[in-house]
Amino acid sequence: MRVLIPDAYFNPEITAFTHLENDIINSLIERGHELKVICPIPQRGIDKETQEKYRHIKHETLMDGKIEIERFWVPKEKSNILSRAFRYFWCNFRGYQIGKKYKGIDMLFSESTPPTQGLLMSMLKKKLKCSIVYSLQDVFPDSLVNAKMTKEGSLIWRAGRILEKYTYKKVDVIVTISKGIRKNLLRKGVPAEKIEMISNWVNIDNVYPVEREKNTIIDEFGVDKDKFLVVYAGNFGAAQGADIVLKAAKELEENREIQFVIFGGGSYFEDAKNEAQSLSNVIINPLLPQSRVSEVYSLGDVSLITCKEGTGGASFPSKTWSIMACNTPIIASFDTESDLAEMLRASNAGECVAAGDAKLLADAIERKYTKWKNGEGEDINLREYVEKNATKEICAGAYVTVMENLCNGKCK
């Protein structure tokens, strides 16, 4: 099977989907398939040295020729909506120009960022006469409405719904990451037989518990290893609602034994850093590289996951599995009827309190602290739950099986 992946972001760029896509690609290669990737010259999440290195690399061949990569120039990514939209359409335009020249493609694979990917995929499908597997990580335009970036009935919402409906009609299989997203699609009339549900996952070979005494973050960032440590790592953006972490820290500031350690990024991170300066119980720094995720999520006595009220019903944060693979309990400020809340209850991995309520979050942290203070240790093995439900072997392999089954039924 020959698979074509038109990407808006690809290695060495860092996105929430990068490591998942890498595992899918490796699983495809391990099972004897060939890949072609079309992507921009990298810009996002990399240093200037790496940018300079790739500036003149337009073609790459990896894994003994089993992966061919063709890169193209793209405008620099900016935060405002118009420039970002232009970048997305430019990526789609160049992706089609390059992709239409390929011969013998059996399968197209893409994830749902940017939301214009469905348009590109349908055009390539018609030209190349192949099938499409579409990984739906984010439901657009619902995500914009939930984050209060637009509202139902607006011009952006109407355009998004047209694009969404067109995408779902043209792709052959939609892989959803949660029951919430599946229900969303069914309500919109997507046939059930077109939907596959595969959880996101973690590579447990690379994410594992690190003892506090051996955790280099302690000395590097001046963390007091004898305190009760509350860790948040993630973006401060429109949908994350991560500002509640600082509000909870303020609620608990008088307790000198509770220390918040934050590693953040995103459009509102500078505001968060400024706010944190007035809080004596907060250490805040930019996100660390993916290679240090084990240290980050092993550091805390508890790790936090957040969302804005109303945004969690159709999502499942991938970092959940990384936290659990480090055997760290979770407190989530999240929609309580979400897949995440259900999983936390089922696995005994932690507690979920209503999204957007800083007092409830602070109370949950204080309950956990009190048990820690009283020496009421918990005998938990969250890593074992991950090993049985959310490893790359199970989940990335499931993606490949979906593609193989579709190809066996539809490929030329």
Image (spheres, helix red, strand yellow):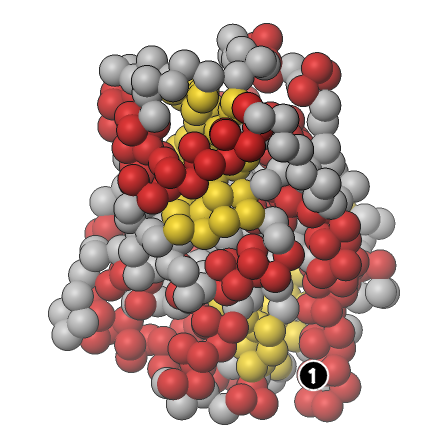
* Residue 21 visible in the picture: no
Q: Quadrant of residue 207?
A: top right
> Residue at coordinates 77% horizontally, 59% vertically from top-left?
388
The picture places residue 149, in percent across and down from the top left corner, at: 21, 56
Q: Which residue is drawn at 72% across and 69% down?
A: 398
86 to 248, vertically: above or below: below
Q: Quadrant of the N terminus?
A: bottom right
Q: Which amino acid does label 1 sit on?
A: Leu
In this rendered view, identify the residue nearer to me: 79 or 255: 255
In-front residue for pair 244/348? 348
Q: In this view, does 9 lie to the left or right of 299?
A: left
**Secondary element at tag 1:** helix
Q: Which of 40 and 407 lies nearest the eye of the viewer?
A: 407
> Does 44 appear above or below 72?
above
Q: Is residue 126 above or below residue 94?
A: below
Which of the image's four quarters has the C terminus?
bottom right
The image shows residue 222 at horizontal and vertical percentages of: 51, 8
Instruction: Compare residues 314 and 402 and report the one nearer the observer.
Output: 314
Count neighbours of disc 1 (C-alpha within 10 A) and say few if under 14, some if 14 to 19, many if 20 or more: some
Q: Could you tell me residue 42's position as x and y percent?
A: 51, 40
Taking the image as shown, residue 324 lies to the left or right of residue 116, namely right
What residue is drawn where x is 45% and y is 47%? 332
Asked which quadrant contains residue 262, the reply is top left
Residue 410 appears in the rendering:
yes
The residue carrying mark 1 is 406
| Residue 102, x across and y down, in percent | 63, 69
In the image, residue 343 sits, relative to residue 356, either above or below, namely: below
> At 29% across and 79% down in the image, what residue appears?
162
State the image quarter where residue 347 is shown: bottom right
